[in-house]
Image (cartoon, rainbow, N blue to C red):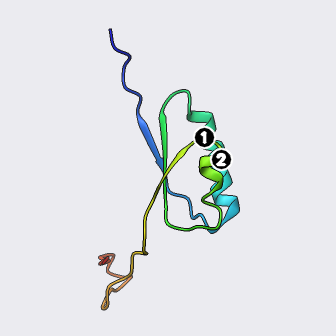
């Protein structure tokens, strides 16, 4: 009988910040035996720590930008 699929947890650390990146790596290490851990990111500064610890990182190129006319008080953001 095939092994049951593990749930996937996606981490999206702000990889320009070492504290947030390493914190999410530690959480992923704690969960790794119970789920698949996948990282996504767009920064370069500390993103290299993720594959060094054995986790996959999917790289996003570019940055999301707030569209012109977005009003933070209406809670209806537009993203390009």
> Do the numbered discs 2 and 1 sit on residues whose CB atoms are within 8 Å?
yes
Residue at screen point 40% across, 33% down:
7
Marks 2 and 1, how far apart at CA: 6 Å
Residue at screen point 60% across, 59% down:
47
- Quadrant that contains the C terminus: bottom left
- Quadrant that contains the N terminus: top left
Residue at screen point 61% across, 43% down:
27
Identify whether 21 is placed above or below 43.
Answer: above
Secondary element at tag 1: loop
Secondary element at tag 2: helix
Mark 2 highlights which residue? 52
Residue at screen point 59% across, 48% down:
51
Identify whether 76 is placed above or below 22.
Answer: below
Residue lying furthest bottom in this view?
Answer: 69
Mark 1 highlights which residue? 54
| Residue 42 pos. (x, y %) | 49, 66
Q: For residue 27, which numbered disc appears in the image?
A: none
Residue toward you, 49 or 22: 49
The quarter of the picture where residue 45 lies is bottom right
Q: Residues within 10 Å of mark 2 (few under 14, many from 20)?
A: few
| Residue 79 pos. (x, y %) | 32, 76
| Residue 78 pos. (x, y %) | 29, 78
């Amino acid at each position: 009988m095939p092994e049951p699929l593990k749930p996937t947890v996606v981490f999206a650390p702000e990889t320009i910040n070492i504290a947030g990146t390493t914190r999410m790596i530690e959480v992923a290490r704690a969960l790794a035996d119970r789920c698949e851990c996948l990282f996504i990111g767009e920064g370069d500064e500390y993103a290299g720590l993720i594959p060094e610890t054995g986790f996959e990182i999917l790289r996003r190129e570019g940055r999301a930008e707030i569209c012109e006319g977005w009003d933070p008080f209406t809670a209806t953001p537009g993203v390009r």
